[in-house]
Structure formats: structure tokens, C-alpha cells
Image (spheres, helix red, strand yellow):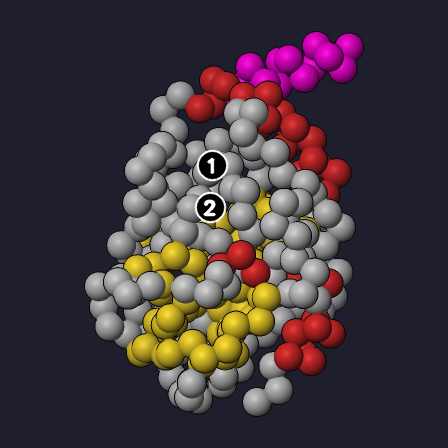
């Protein structure tokens, strides 16, 4: 019986892949000031966008550990277009979680410090950390510049995008991820207790370039997680995030200004 149900579900996932909208991050353009905590991390000599991050105090931002690869140079705040200069900050210290496992994607969370104080305005503000248990079906929002096509070459979106989703239990996340893997064997996440999952709909979700971007509770504005690697690019699997509440002691110990 269960085998039959899984086959039907897999067929449903396959059918949903047809006609998927090309904009992975939901196709919604962010307004200036809508996500004042968001910062784009720029890499290398060309200062290309590679990851998102969230301001958490006057000197530090939160992101994914795999975004801190030694090539990060600058963070840009107060902008919704990649071509806009915004307010630029040189990154002077990167702090990936010491137990980050790049194979299983466990503890994929990190911090970075900028060279001067971030002055808060209507366009630039910090996001508070979630420190409590997250309920299932919590309404969330994700903003990012992630790729808007499902096939290479993955081009980041020039205009900051956002999507609405809802959290789910890790058991439901594992089930949905298994079904998605029947369609795309390359998608093989290892869901951990310190992960949190959220799902919008087939054809809407995070993709390459969204890593490190904050998942925020739409009810109270707290950051619940940061996008980890291994995204399915809206092929029907949930997006999964490093659960911020699992790391607040480590964060607090490393963001002393």
C-alpha cells in the first residue's frame, strides 16, 4: 500500500515539474526597505554576489558556513538591485561554525564581522534572533538574489526577490525530500535536528545564490534559520535551513562588539 502511495506521489511531483515558473524565488520583487536586515555578500576581485546574510547587530551578520570560503570581500546593505551601490562594508572576520560538516550539511551556519559600525536607518536594520521552539505551519518569508532558472547557467536575480512559505516538521520534510529524490536523484539532503524546513509550493523556492539568506517569521520578525546548501531549486522538495535557535549560545559568544 505504501509503495503504491509513494509511486502516485512521485508521479504527482513529476507532473508538477512541467510548466514550473522560471523565477525560483517566487517572482516577487522586493520594495526598497522591505527587508532592511538583508545584506548581499560579494566575492573575489569582481565583487560578484554569491550569498545572502542578515544583520544581527552593529558589526555582525549571520549567514551559512559554506558562504565563508575565504573569498568573501564585502557586504552590501540598503539595496534591492545588485547594481545599486547601497552601503558597502568590508568583511574583516569570518566565523564559520567549528563543527560545520560540508558533506552532511550539518551546522551550516556562520557569522562575519564588518570593519565599521552599521548605522541603522529605515533601509538598514538588524533582525532579532529566534530563541524558542518554532511551531509547525509558522508563516515565513525568505528574501534573496538566488537563481531564477532551474538549469545551468544559474544566473542570480538582479532584483531582490522574496517568497512566502510555512514551516513543517522534520518528519514531513524527510518524506517530501524522499519523494523529490525519486524525481531528481541528485537531491540528497541529510535532515538534522538542527535543521528547520519550510515549503511554499512546487516551482517556488530557494536556489543557488540564496545560501545564507535569512528565513524570517512573518508574525514577529525573528530570523528562524539561514539557507543551507543542497537546495532543490523549487523542484518540489522543501527548502531547509540551519535552525537559529539551536545556535544562539554560540552566536552570542561570537558577536561581542
Query: In which quadrant of the rendered image does the C terminus lie?
Result: bottom right
- Tell whether position 5 is magenta: yes
Query: In which quadrant of the rendered image does the N terminus lie?
Result: top right
Residue hosting label 2: 206
- Disc 2 crowd rating (10 Å Cα; few below 14, some 14-19, many 20+) is many
Please say if 151 is above or below 9: below
Residue at x 50%, y 19% (from the top left corner): 14
Is the Cβ of the residue at disc 2 closer than 8 Å to that at disc 1? Answer: yes
Residue hosting label 1: 234
- Disc 1 crowd rating (10 Å Cα; few below 14, some 14-19, many 20+) is many
Please say if 58 is above or below 81: below
Rounded to the nearest whole Å, what is the CA distance between mark 2 and mark 1? 7 Å
* Camera-side residue of 54 and 73: 73
* Camera-side residue of 221 and 76: 76
Residue at x 44%, y 24% (from the top left corner): 17
Residue at x 65%, y 28% (from the top left corner): 178
Q: Which residues are magenta?
A: 1-13
- Tell whether position 198 is magenta: no
- Chain-order first, disc 2 or disc 1: 2
Please say if 30 is above or below 88: above
Residue at x 55%, y 14% (from the top left corner): 11
Tell me the tag on residue 173: none
Q: Main secondary structure of the magenta part?
A: helix
Would residue 235 be found to the left or right of residue 100 on screen?
left
Amino acid at each position: 500500500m505504501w509503495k503504491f502511495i509513494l509511486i502516485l506521489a512521485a508521479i504527482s511531483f513529476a507532473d508538477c515539474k512541467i510548466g514550473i515558473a522560471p523565477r525560483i524565488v517566487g517572482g516577487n520583487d522586493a520594495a526598497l526597505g522591505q527587508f532592511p536586515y538583508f545584506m548581499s555578500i560579494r566575492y573575489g576581485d569582481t565583487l560578484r554576489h554569491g550569498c545572502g546574510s542578515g544583520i544581527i547587530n552593529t558589526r555582525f551578520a549571520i549567514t551559512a558556513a559554506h558562504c565563508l570560503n575565504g573569498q568573501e570581500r564585502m557586504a552590501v546593505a540598503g539595496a534591492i538591485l545588485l547594481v545599486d551601490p547601497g552601503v558597502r562594508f568590508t568583511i574583516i572576520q569570518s566565523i564559520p561554525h567549528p563543527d560545520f560538516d560540508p558533506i552532511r550539511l550539518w551546522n551550516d551556519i556562520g557569522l562575519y564581522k564588518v570593519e565599521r559600525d552599521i548605522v541603522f536607518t529605515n533601509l538598514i536594520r538588524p533582525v532579532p534572533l529566534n530563541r524558542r521552539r518554532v511551531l509547525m505551519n509558522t508563516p515565513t518569508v525568505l528574501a534573496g538574489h538566488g537563481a531564477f532558472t532551474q538549469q545551468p547557467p544559474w544566473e542570480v536575480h538582479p532584483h531582490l526577490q522574496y517568497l512566502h512559505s510555512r514551516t513543517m516538521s522534520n518528519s514531513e520534510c524527510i518524506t517530501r525530500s524522499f519523494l523529490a529524490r525519486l524525481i531528481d536523484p541528485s537531491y540528497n539532503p541529510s535532515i538534522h535536528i538542527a535543521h528547520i524546513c519550510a515549503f511554499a509550493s512546487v516551482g517556488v523556492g530557494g536556489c543557488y545564490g540564496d545560501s545564507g539568506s535569512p528565513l524570517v517569521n512573518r508574525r514577529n520578525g525573528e530570523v528562524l534559520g539561514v539557507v543551507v546548501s543542497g537546495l532543490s531549486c523549487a523542484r518540489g522538495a522543501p527548502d531547509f535551513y540551519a535552525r537559529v535557535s539551536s545556535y544562539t549560545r554560540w552566536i552570542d559568544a561570537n558577536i561581542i562588539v
